[in-house]
């Protein structure tokens, strides 16, 4: 396997990239001067140096200050973050989307994946034990006197796998939630922007009707 | 304008049909034997004969029995239809979609359109006066002792026009709803089937969060 | 089967129309006033009255004048049509496309279909016998002293079926073409508008290279 | 600009990649372990080390042997390459496409771009001077007694820019081609795989008719 093929293979793993486009990326890189590829290489190594995974919420974040030294991200460190709610979310790009919408000011927890419906060894793939510990630690008021956790919001995409993950996580955190009197909620369902009644599936109509207000 | 052009013009008004496809329809019809076009013509005239618009809900329906003689559709006539709820809906194809989902067993009212945001003369286009009369008549228990109307559900597509129509209808039926103590609700909003958090717009995320349960 | 279903079935046969859109057409027609459906019905019967199939080239045409009485179309009647070339074409809409491009001024012959690759009883489906007779009659100078046929151009879409039809017709008209010293050609192949080299298939590249000039 | 934004900016320059997907690439890389990014970095530096641009045809190629030391690619070095034809081609990925089709066994010359229709300083962007020199040197039989150049094939995509480049290059190499009695051809035009007559544009029909055979 020559370097062109090798590089194509790497790009083929990129999300949404097929064989053809992977090859185009390689030709694109060859046609650029070497400064471009060096810049990319350098940024890649910077990424590993300047980005850390938060010990608290497991999101990736850019290390900005001494405060981040202990690998805690700016959201988790921020005293204005509402610590009474914890949103459990699949992956970093979902979190970015919620963050950008400015509709939520609470804490997050990155689960690290969804639970495939036919999966046997789930625990290896998602951070369910870490989530339990997180809930337990957040449930107690901390030294700074911050409000303690009152609600866990399960925020997964609306797909069979998302549904399955919702049920799985609910079951897993049931005891601990009861113990600390924490509410467990899921994102609301119904019509979303652009939904046309004429083309709606039965589940969407059912949810829209059930959740009418 | 020859007959080919004339027929093309008619087909161009069909929903989703452009000039090119309209022309293809004409060539298709020419290539079929005359029995085909006659069959189509006959079905068209049958449509007008066998289909009526319900006096009660304004949907189009197939006249099946003597019972329909008075131009009341099978849903409105059916004693098992729950007359305590009335779903206000834009058009027949939306009603078909809800009916097929089997999630709703109440009455319907076809508004006949949405209210364009910049529209002046709204009343001409939608059946707002007919809706008020309908609510008033349904609010009183009828001779058959059927349950009277308790809730009006506004069920429009989730678009700026749908939103605008929702507000407009709410405003218009406010007094009558208060007078008869009728609840006015709208379809629930949030994630719909297939919604991915990563690609969700702010409104959908806001609704999903607000309507979490 | 009620009239709505019956009409849906008819529309489903229209080119490019699926079940859903067929149903929408029916709802669209119901929502229009009866003048609209009557207009459509009338146009359909006009189509059969005002359109005839040309005895010479088998295209459908609008009967415009007394001249057309004998069911010969305006192209075949026109003395300015170049009768030294005959373009054999699959269907009316292909002919319309060539006619509109104004790049060809010769005669046409509508074959009435392509020959499926695995077809047994081809003759029933396409007008191969009619084509032979047409070539024979055109090969002799007529009473008006018009130039006689010199070339038959096979003009089919570039698909496996189009290719197969090209070979089949060539084989079938071989003897008659030789007898009257008529050239048989096919449309040129190579790059077409918008073709990008990077995404071209082998056949297109081969033809483009072979037919370079 | 933090490293995430910086890396997004780099990926946004990749062919066909928008802001959103560029961001996804960055999150994808963060989620992979560091070995992955290192592998990518290493491959990028290998690319610069193992790939060279051919002095003769200007394509990028993988340095395989000592023979390539002088920066001449395997196609240019190969004694079985037909040196009587030279295909002038826009970019490496076009060459790959032709090469893969196995319909051409001659030499190539990468022009390095197309000539924009409104461009002033064309020479800076494409290798027109290098092409002239190449033609001149190939026109004389070389020491190895290989056949000298007989034909230059202009092989550009069929777009307004491709057309414009074709005319521009023809004009520029006119004198030198005449001097050495070299034919200048362009790729053939007409129907390409999948072309349907019904949907063909006028240019394609005109070319298909003109180039019929």
Image: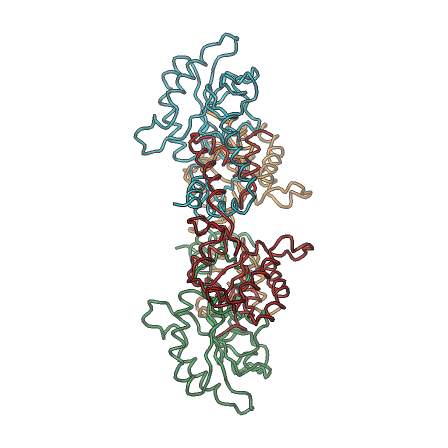
Chain colours: A red, B green, C orange, D cyan
Q: D78 or D102: which is nearer to us?
A: D78
Q: A103 or B201: which is nearer to us?
A: A103
**Residue at x 53%, y 46% (from the top left corner):** A16
- Is residue C11 depicted above or below D192 in this figure? below
- Locate residue A123 relative to residue B151 in the image: left or right: right
Where does the image place residue C39, in percent across and percent down from the top left? 45, 64
Where does the image place residue D126, in percent across and percent down from the top left? 38, 27
Quadrant of the image occupied by residue C17 = bottom right
- Is residue D173 depicted above or below A31 in this figure? above
- Locate residue D94 relative to residue C162 in the image: left or right: left
Image mark count: 0
Q: D151 or D111: which is nearer to us?
A: D111
Where does the image place residue D155, in percent across and percent down from the top left? 46, 28
Determine if residue A210 is in view: yes
- Is residue D55 depicted above or below A131 in this figure? above
Determine if residue C38 is in view: no
Where does the image place residue A115, in percent across and percent down from the top left? 62, 57
Residue ranking furthest to the left: D120
Quadrant of the image occupied by residue A128 = bottom right
Q: A170 or D101: which is nearer to us?
A: A170
**Residue at x 43%, y 80% (from the top left corner):** B131
Which corner quadrant holds the N terminus of chain B?
Answer: bottom left
């Amino acid at each position: 396997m020559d370097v062109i093929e090798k590089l194509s293979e790497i790009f083929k793993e990129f999300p949404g990239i097929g064989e053809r486009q992977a090859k185009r990326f390689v030709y694109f890189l060859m046609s650029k001067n070497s400064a471009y590829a060096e810049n990319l290489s350098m940024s890649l190594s910077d990424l590993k140096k300047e980005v850390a995974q938060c010990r608290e919420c497991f999101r990736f974040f850019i290390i900005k200050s001494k405060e981040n030294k202990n690998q805690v991200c700016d959201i988790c460190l921020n005293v204005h973050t509402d610590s009474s709610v914890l949103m459990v979310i699949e992956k970093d790009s979902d979190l970015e989307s919620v963050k950008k919408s400015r509709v939520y000011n609470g804490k997050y927890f990155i689960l690290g994946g969804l639970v495939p419906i036919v999966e046997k060894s789930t625990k290896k793939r998602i951070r369910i034990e870490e989530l339990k510990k997180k809930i337990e630690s957040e449930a107690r008021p901390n030294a700074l006197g911050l409000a303690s956790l009152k609600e866990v919001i399960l925020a997964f995409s609306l797909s069979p796998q998302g549904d399955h993950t919702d049920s799985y996580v609910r079951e897993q955190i049931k005891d601990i939630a009861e113990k600390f009197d924490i509410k467990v909620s899921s994102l609301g369902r119904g019509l979303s922007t652009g939904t046309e009644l004429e083309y709606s599936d039965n589940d969407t109509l059912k949810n829209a009707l059930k959740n009418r207000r």
